[in-house]
Amino acid sequence: MTKMTINLTDTLYNYVLDHSLQEPPLVKQLREETAKLPMSAMQTPPEETQFLTLLIKLMNASKILEIGTFTGYSTLWFAMTIPEHGVVTACDVDEEWTTIGKRYWEKAGVSHKINLEIAPALDTMNDLLNNHKANYYDLIFIDADKENYMNYYEKALLLIRPGGVIVIDNVLWGGSVVNSLNQSRDVQAIRALNKMLINDDRVTVSLLPIGDGVTFVLPKK
Ligand code: SAH
Ligand code: CA
């Protein structure tokens, strides 16, 4: 036994999935199609995505902003989770990957709940702020280019409604956050945000070692 988070072997990880994953069939199909892509590792792991859908249900969330869509895996599961009147605003710069997602969103009958914005996410966030979407979103999932994480976070603080949650993905960056030999721009940006968050009086945080590390941020507004 240990006071720390348990280390997962492959066998134990599979046990976790076998005993908790309730992935809808179309979501699973999209994961299997995504797995064939060279960049498949960018997809949010299923157990993490499922936990976020649980959070969505707990919060009764209906308005979600996703920064980084890829093949629309998390987007699909989020859209299937929110009520009929809900919306997922999905941001990405890549047409090819998101086109894969669109097929599944349509098949699942949830495409009317998804607004895909193909543009740099920072531009989309600024547009949203100019279009009366300050204090609007219940949940914001930050999962795009890491160099912009600080910018996304600051915009997210304006776009999130009081009581809403900002979720930041990949905050451990494969463990590289503690490897001083790694000074890539990505890891430096993640370290800077992590360091800033623990001292940010505007919010309450919880960093959990799920997937590649996820920080949950509850603004005090
Ligand atoms: N949430 C997705 C994974 C996102 S991967 C899932 O669950 O599968 C990160 C995505 O961020 C990529 O698709 C990439 O095209 C996108 N991205 C990179 N730079 C971006 C930018 N400046 N604005 C918006 N999206 C960007
Ligand atoms: Ca991610």
Image (cartoon, grey):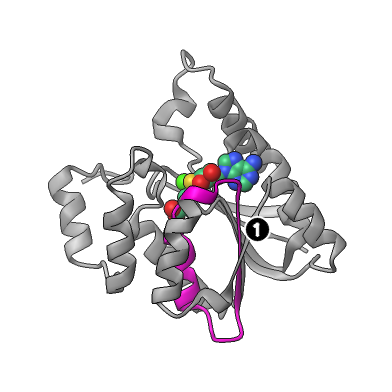
**Judging from the image, what secondary structure is the residue with disc 1 in?**
strand
Where residue 192 appears, as percent x and y from the top left, is 64, 31
Q: Quick one: which residue is furthest to the top in this view?
A: 181
Q: Note whether residue 201 is visible.
A: no
Where residue 28 appears, as percent x and y from the top left, is 28, 64
Q: In which quarter of the image is residue 161?
A: bottom right
Q: Note whether residue 93 is visible.
A: yes
> Disc 1 marks which residue?
117
Where residue 216 appears, as percent x and y from the top left, is 55, 55
Above or below — where is 8 with respect to 126?
Answer: above
Taking the spot 49% from the left edge, 64% from the top edge, the residue there is: 75
Q: In this rendered view, identify the residue nearer to me: 190 or 83.
A: 83
Above or below — where is 86 with respect to 27?
Answer: below
Left or right: where does residue 194 sit relative to residue 108?
right
Q: Would you say residue 74 sits in the magenta stretch?
A: yes
Q: Which amino acid does label 1 sit on?
A: Glu
Left or right: where does residue 3 sit relative to residue 176?
left
Which residue range is magenta in the image?
A: 71-96
